[in-house]
Image (tube, grey):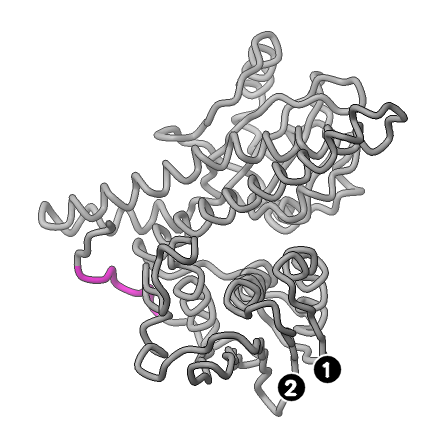
């Protein structure tokens, strides 16, 4: 089975068969647990759990395979994952049944919630005045996680159906192929919206957790461009790349999210005209530029487009939650960088991301914002 879709999922994904043998892990799981895919495939899934949980997990796994169903674990429970270096982390896990090459398997979505639990403990100390804010943000986090579980399972099943349709020699599967592709596009859109809501809840609870690694920003931009190129082309635009080497230390997944949001934004408002994506390095800093030739943004709206639920156009004309640029700004600022827009109406827009090539000095966790209502 082709598991490429799993590498675009922001959660760590682990697939195991009925015997508990690991069949596949995605890139995020490799990063979270510290094991490479080649090292864990074929080994017991209990390898990823602290020793005190392994017997309980084996018993639970047997019961799950007897009556498989999509469900969350870890909401209110003390579950932990185990990294290769022996460090433990607080985890939330969601399970979904899946068939892989004729074998009944389970796909587990795993999230490291260590920071969230610490921030929840801090929030609880604030007293009654903050209870409503905390409960709302916890609800958003839990609700988003719950929504991601069926969406991920649906994406996997659609990918399998798509493969079957393209390989069949019958006319009916070929007739279904464009409809399956349309369903895949819509599930990806749902996944993006859910991830945006989840990110906002994380940001409301405190600072984003970043996982720095050595990488080339040009490689990140190139991979994202290939991933979203089809969506850009469906909008009628073409995508031009100007990518110079820009090595540094950043969180790959989060910067992929920034570039994706900017390219999707450009394709939405670019009026079918060419879009350019460039990367360059200048001394201690690196820069990303995403430019379109669309409707542009009036100067009085430049700051507002980076706020939650804000947009420079009527909501009736363009979909979305108005969170993409807000999330991008939070990620960039967490890296110690800046994001801005250069635009005038009718002349397109250029979004510029300026990043330090080395992580900023560690800072104390940010306090929660003043209470605000999410509409």
Given residues 366 and 118, the one toward you in this image is 366
Which residue is drawn at the image coordinates 67% and 30% (left, top)? 15
In the image, residue 126 above or below residue 104: below
Of the image marks 1 and 2, the number of the one nearer the N terminus: 1
Q: CA distance from mark 1 to mark 2?
A: 7 Å
> Does the magenta-highlighted stretch encompass residue 215?
no
Residue 169 x/y as whole percent: 90, 26
Given residues 321 and 340, the one toward you in this image is 321
Q: Residue furthest left?
A: 129
Which residue is drawn at the image coordinates 48% and 23% (left, top)? 71
How many other residues sit within 10 Å of disc 2, few (<14), some (14-19) or many (≥20)? many
Left or right of residue 87: residue 242: right
Residue 359 x/y as whole percent: 52, 75
Q: Residue furthest bottom?
A: 283
In the image, residue 171 above or below residue 290: above
- Tell me the tag on residue 18: none
Q: Residue 282 lies in what quarter of the image?
A: bottom right
Residue 117 x/y as whole percent: 35, 45
In this picture, which residue range is highlighted in magenta?
364-370
In the image, residue 7 above or below residue 95: below
> Does the magenta-highlighted stretch encompass residue 369?
yes
Given residues 167 and 50, the one toward you in this image is 167
How many other residues sit within 10 Å of disc 1, few (<14), some (14-19) or many (≥20)? some
Which residue is drawn at the image coordinates 64% and 24% (left, top)? 106
- Residue carrying label 1: 244
Q: Are marks 1 and 2 in contact (CB under 8 Å)?
A: yes
Q: Residue furthest top?
A: 66
Residue 35 x/y as whole percent: 70, 46
Residue 10 showing in the rendered view? yes
- In the structure shown, which secondary structural element does the residue marked by tag 2 occupy? strand
- Residue carrying label 2: 281
């Amino acid at each position: 089975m082709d598991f490429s879709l799993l590498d675009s999922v922001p959660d760590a994904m682990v697939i195991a068969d009925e015997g508990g043998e690991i069949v596949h892990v995605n890139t995020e799981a490799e990063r979270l647990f510290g094991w490479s895919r080649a090292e864990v495939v074929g080994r017991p899934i209990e390898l990823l759990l602290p020793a005190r949980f392994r017997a309980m997990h084996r018993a639970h796994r047997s019961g799950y395979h007897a009556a498989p169903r999509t469900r969350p674990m870890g909401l209110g429970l003390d579950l932990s994952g185990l990294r290769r270096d022996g460090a433990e982390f607080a985890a939330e896990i969601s399970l979904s049944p899946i068939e892989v090459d004729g074998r009944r398997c389970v796909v587990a979505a795993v999230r490291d919630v260590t920071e969230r639990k610490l921030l929840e403990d801090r929030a609880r100390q604030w007293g009654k005045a903050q209870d409503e804010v905390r409960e709302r943000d916890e609800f958003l986090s839990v609700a988003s996680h719950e929504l991601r579980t069926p969406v991920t399972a649906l994406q996997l099943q659609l990918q399998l159906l798509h493969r079957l349709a393209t390989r069949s020699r019958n006319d009916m599967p070929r007739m279904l192929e464009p409809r399956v592709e349309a369903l895949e596009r819509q599930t990806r859109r749902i996944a993006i919206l859910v991830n945006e809501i989840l990110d906002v809840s994380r940001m409301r609870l405190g600072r984003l957790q970043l996982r720095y690694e050595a990488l080339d920003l040009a490689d990140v931009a190139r991979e994202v461009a290939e991933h979203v190129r089809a969506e850009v082309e469906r909008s009628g635009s073409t995508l031009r790349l100007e990518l110079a080497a820009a090595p540094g230390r950043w969180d790959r997944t989060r910067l992929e999210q920034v570039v994706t949001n900017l390219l999707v934004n450009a394709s939405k408002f670019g009026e079918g005209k060419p879009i350019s994506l460039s990367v360059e390095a200048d001394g201690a800093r690196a820069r990303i530029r995403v430019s379109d030739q669309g409707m542009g943004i009036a100067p009085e709206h430049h700051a507002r487009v980076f706020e939650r639920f804000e947009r420079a156009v009527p909501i009736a004309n363009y979909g979305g939650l108005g969170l993409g640029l807000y999330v991008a700004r939070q990620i960039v600022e967490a890296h110690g960088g800046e994001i801005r827009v250069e635009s005038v109406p009718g002349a397109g827009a250029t979004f510029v991301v300026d990043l330090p090539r080395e992580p900023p000095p560690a800072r104390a966790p940010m306090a929660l914002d003043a209470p605000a209502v999410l509409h």
